[in-house]
């Protein structure tokens, strides 16, 4: 069986001798178009400049190659990708658990905790848990969640209205924008 030769590419870019095309469109180190020429000629120009020849658009006809410092180019790409990841905010869902017969001071404490979560940009899941006989009075306890949302109306909006899920009633709050 014959071994198939494959060029080694880092991040799908062919560099220097890995470029096997007959003709390429060359872009110089300053970004100016240098025209269409053979890959060998382009390689010689890159060596004269002391830089690398990198195929940046392999699907184009003819493929586009650029004379650049490949190490610096890779570093710039990695830095841009890292900056993009840094700017993304992952929104967490924080949960605040309540009971149907919660005292007013305890409710204030839970409201303050939710306010802190919302100020950090997180979503808040407010869960009203029912135990034993409290299950029979589920819908009459909805006022606890309504009161909770009312106290946070200056900083939050109700994303999902109170909904019964098994032995609990849940509601989602998000920060006002």
Image: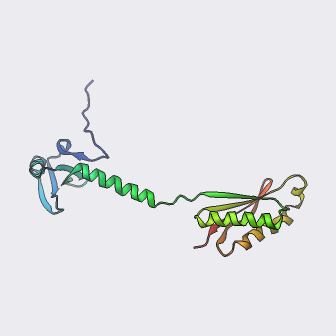
Residue at horizontal 27%, vertical 23%?
1
Residue at horizontal 62%, vertical 66%?
118
| Side (left or right) of 7 relative to 22 | right
Front-most of 156 and 11? 156
Query: How far from the left and from the top, in percent, is residue 25?
Result: 16, 56
**Picture quadrant of residue 143:** bottom right
Query: How far from the left and from the top, in percent, is residue 140?
Result: 86, 66
Query: How far from the left and from the top, in percent, is residue 173?
Result: 66, 66
Q: Is residue 113 above or below residue 151?
A: above
Query: How far from the left and from the top, in percent, is residue 172?
Result: 68, 63
Q: Is residue 2 visible?
A: yes
Residue at horizontal 66%, vertical 76%?
154
Front-most of 116 and 135? 116
Location of the C terminus by quadrant is bottom right
**Picture colour scheme:** rainbow
Q: Residue furthest top?
A: 1
**Picture quadrant of residue 161:** bottom right
How many numbered markers are drawn? 0
Residue at horizontal 78%, vertical 71%?
147
Q: Is residue 58 visible?
A: no
| Side (left or right) of 88 relative to 148 | left
Q: Is residue 174 above or below residue 4?
A: below
Q: Residue furthest bottom?
A: 154
Front-most of 51 and 22? 51
Q: Is residue 103 above or below residue 21?
A: below
């Amino acid at each position: 069986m014959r071994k198939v030769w494959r060029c080694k590419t880092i991040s799908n870019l062919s560099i220097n001798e890995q470029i096997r095309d007959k003709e390429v469109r060359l872009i110089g180190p300053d970004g100016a178009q240098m025209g269409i020429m053979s890959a060998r000629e382009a390689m010689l120009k890159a060596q004269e400049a002391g830089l690398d020849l990198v195929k940046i658009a392999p699907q184009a006809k003819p493929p586009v190659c650029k004379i650049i410092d490949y190490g610096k180019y890779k570093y710039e790409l990695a830095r841009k990708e890292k900056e993009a990841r840094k700017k993304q905010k992952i929104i967490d869902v924080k949960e605040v658990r309540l009971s149907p017969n919660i005292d007013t001071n305890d409710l204030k404490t839970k409201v303050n905790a939710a306010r802190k979560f919302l100020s950090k940009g997180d979503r808040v899941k407010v869960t009203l848990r029912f135990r034993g006989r409290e299950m029979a009075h589920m819908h009459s306890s909805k006022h606890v969640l309504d009161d909770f949302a009312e106290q946070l109306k200056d900083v939050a909006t109700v994303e999902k209205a109170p909904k019964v899920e098994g032995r609990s009633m849940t509601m989602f709050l998000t920060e006002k924008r």
